[in-house]
Every structure is written in structure tokens, then in C-alpha cells.
Image (tube, grey):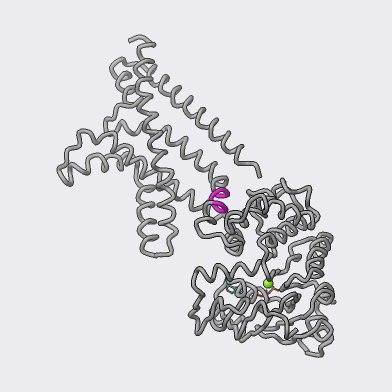
Amino acid sequence: MSETTIYLEMNNIKKSFGDLQVLKDISLKVHEGEVLSIIGPSGSGKSTLLRIATMLETMDNGSIKYMDKEAASAENGSVHYAKPQALREIKKNFGLVFQNFNLFPHKTVLHNLIDAPVHVQKRNKTEVIAEAKALLEKMGLSDKEDYYPSQLSGGQQQRVAIARALALKPKVLFFDEPTSALDPELTGEVLKVIKALAEEKMTMVIVTHEMSFAKKISDRVIFMDKGVIAVEGTPEEVFNSDHSRMQEFLGKLKHE
Amino acid sequence: MSFFNMLEQISSGMLHTILIFFFTLVFSLPLGWIVAFGRMSKNKIISGITAFFISILRGTPLMLQLMVVFYGPYFLFQLPIGNWRFPAIIVGFSINYAAYFAEIYRSGISAIPVGQYEAAHILGYTKVQTFFKIILPQVIRIILPAVTNEVITLVKDTSLAFSISYIEMFSITKQIASTQTTLMPFAIAAAFYYIFNLLVSFVMRRLEKRLNYY
Ligand SMILES: Nc1ncnc2c1ncn2[C@@H]1O[C@H](COP(=O)(O)OP(=O)(O)OP(=O)(O)O)[C@@H](O)[C@H]1O
Ligand SMILES: [Mg+2]
């Protein structure tokens, strides 16, 4: 991995909410083409970490770099961001897929996809539409481009949300529990799409509770516990680790 | 005075009623947004002052507010108020209705899930784009029924202009009724207000239907 480009680097991230220290000195790197899964018990800080990486949340300490460019750094609660122009460029590097989709309900599927490329990135509309249609095709949603999100199943909505994120051509795509708002029978169709992206070497960071899925598609897995990275390595290394909290975590999942 | 005579005089007042209605909406609907943003400001002083004024405007009679706006310039600064009557009505109505609209807008905005802002932010929308392209279209759909209620109230409230002797439909009606000692003018005026509101409801319902596309 060391010879490939580092897309994301987070160093010494710390974050507290009031007295609760949610992230305690977390560092991680994401390489080009890599699929990194983040697993761990509820409340261990996985979402917070993603929200800090995508700058939806501020950090107290640490630094975030995309493509070797510093996006933000913080010391003792005061955050310093890159200059607005540079930051806007840096933010183009990543996309985020939310647990509850957050599609725009007043826009059709197609317009959910093309609005940001056309109005934010100011790209050619005809070109964007052609690409959006190709993306929908890939997601198995070609016949749904004129539907409104409320007319779709949860699984379809989440696939639209993935397509919407991909329409901006991010280098890294983050997922925060992309299937946990879905009925079990709809989970599969979303996981299939993510798996297809992994096969195309899309760089992804996935927070998930789907252990067998994480085991299958990840190049690397991080097990978070109480705000620290407790175990990190290949799926085999992590799932076979004798770390007591990891064993406890896997045991609990089995009994659910 | 014949029935048609009454009808003619009362309907001449109708024009003034419509003017009050129209200008009040033209000014108060946008002004309401400014007030709503003031109310939602992160600056505690701005939001505090705005909240105070909203509560005064909603907590005191509109008739009293009209009188303050109309007589204020004269009582406070000895300014001539000869031509001030109609502007004063529009100012008084607009400020009062802006306060009500502001609270409606605010409740509409707070009904939008934070995830909509976060999604827009991640997709690179600026704050202004997020508001106009993502938030506002959803807010308008949410608030339209409440706005309709206010607009219907406004049709009836225009009659309060009689309190500062502005000659609109209601003051003419009252005049005729007292000189002719008959209830007929009131019946005619009631019919006018009622038909006006039927029209308003019809237009607003059409609008609601058009916005119910998702
Ligand atoms: N905005 C916030 N304000 C206060 N506390 C918060 C906030 N966001 C998260 N927390 C707390 O931080 C801790 C970590 O939350 P986080 O959402 O990162 O956990 P998680 O690992 O994603 O859990 P889950 O698997 O349930 O999604 C939790 O105790 C949570 O209550
Ligand atoms: Mg979470």
C-alpha cells in the first residue's frame, strides 16, 4: 500500500462533547483505491469521526489532509481551515452517503443527481445529464429518473443517494451505515451497488454494522472502541483478533 | 336610497379595500422573511429585539397599532399628516402582518430536517444556494396553509382601516347604514367580503395543489 497515493490523512483527532471525550487521538490514512471499513459498538465515535472527516463537525485537536493538502487543523478547540477558495477545492475530493439518504424531496431523481454538478460545479448540463443517466443505469434505476424520492423504496432512495454523490466525481466516498435504515430485504441491493464500486477500485470509507459485508469487501478494517482505534488491519486480522473488546463485540452481534 | 345606489357606493369602497389588501401582501410577505431571519439570528441581541417586537405586534390590537402609526408623526414630531392616511394604513398593516408571517416562516424553516442542510453542504452548495434551491421550496409548501389563513384574516382586517377614517368599503357601509337606518348595507358588505375570501381560498387552493407535486 505504501507506494500508492494517500487520499486522506487524519492525524491525532480529538473530540469532546461537553465532558464526554468521544474521540481520543485518532490517526488514519486512506489510500487510493482502498476500501476501509469502520466497525465498533454503538457510541464508539464512528459517526463523529466521519462527520469530522467530511467537516460537518469541528474537531478539538488534530489535522485533516486530502491529497496532501491540509483542509483543517485544530489545537485546543480552535479550528483553522484552509482558505475558502482552497477549501472549496479540497471539499470536491469527497462525498458522503447518509444513513437516512437526505435526498431532496422536491426534486426528481434526475434533478437530485444533476443539480449540484450543474449549479455548483458549473459543468455542461447536457454532459451532466448523460452521465447522470449512465449512473442511474448502473444503479438499476433507469426507469426512475422522473420519480420523486417519496415514490421510491428505501433501498432505491439510498441508491439514488449514492448516485448523487458519485455524480460529483469524488475521489473518496464516505458511507455512514448506509443500510441501517433499511429493511433486511432492501439491504442487499444497496450492498451490491457498494460492492460493484469496490470492484471498480472506488476509494471508500464505510461505517457499517454489516460484519460479513465488511469482511468481504474491505481491504482494511478499523475496530473502534470508546473513541480509540482498538484493532486495525486486514479483515482476517481484525475479525480473528483476540482483542477482548473485539471478541465481546462480535459475540454480542451473534446473539442479536 | 335604492338598493343599487347602496351597491354602487359600497363597491366603490371595495377598490380601496383591495388596495389595502394588495399592498399589505406585497410588503409584508417579503418583510416577514427579514423579520424571521432577525428572529433566528445567532446574535442574541438581534433575535431578542426581534422577538420582543413580534410579541408586541401580535399581542396588541391592530387597530391600536394603526392609530399609533397614523397619529405618531404628528403627536411626536408635529409633522403634517394630511397625506399620510393611506401610507400609514399600509405601513401599519404590513408591519403587523410581517410579524405573523415571520412566525409562520420560522416554523416552516424549523420543520426542515438538518440532514437537508448537511447534504447540501457536502454537495458544495453555498449558503445562499442552499436556502433558495433546497430549503425555500420545501418551506413554501409547508407554510402555505398557514399563510392562506392569514391572507383570509387580512381580507376581513382591512375593515379596521375605518378606525383612522380611511374611506374603504366598511366605513362607507357604516355610514350608509347609520344614515338610512337599515341593515341592508351590512348584508351587501358581508357578501362582498365573503366573495372576496372565496376567491382568495380558490387561488390559494390552486397554489397548494400545484405545490403538492411531491
Ligand atoms: N452533537 C452531539 N452532541 C453531544 N453528544 C454527541 C453528539 N454527537 C454524538 N454525540 C455522542 O458522542 C458519542 C459517539 O457518537 P457517535 O454517533 O460518533 O457513535 P457511533 O459509533 O456512530 O454510534 P452508532 O453505532 O450508534 O451510530 C455518543 O455517546 C453520542 O451520544
Ligand atoms: Mg453512528
Q: Residue at x 64, y 81 (%)?
A: A9
Residue A98 seen by the camera: no
Q: Residue at x 60, y 41 (%)?
A: B211
| Ligand 2 - quadrant of the structure image | bottom right
Q: Is residue A69 above or below residue A244?
A: above
Residue extending furthest top?
A: B2
Q: How many marks?
A: 0
x, y percentage for residue A68?
Answer: 61, 79
Q: Residue at x 79, y 76 (%)?
A: A218
Residue extending furthest left?
A: B78
Question: In front: A60, or A116?
Answer: A116
Please provide the residue range marked out in magenta. B133-139
Quarter of the picture holding the C terminus of chain A:
bottom right
- Tell me if residue B138 is in the magenta stretch: yes
Q: Is residue A50 above or below residue A13?
A: above
- Tell me if residue B207 is in the magenta stretch: no
Quarter of the picture holding the N terminus of chain A:
bottom right
x, y percentage for residue B172?
Answer: 32, 22
Question: In front: A223, or A1?
Answer: A1
Secondary structure mostly seen in the magenta stretch: helix
Q: Residue at x 56, y 36 (%)?
A: B207
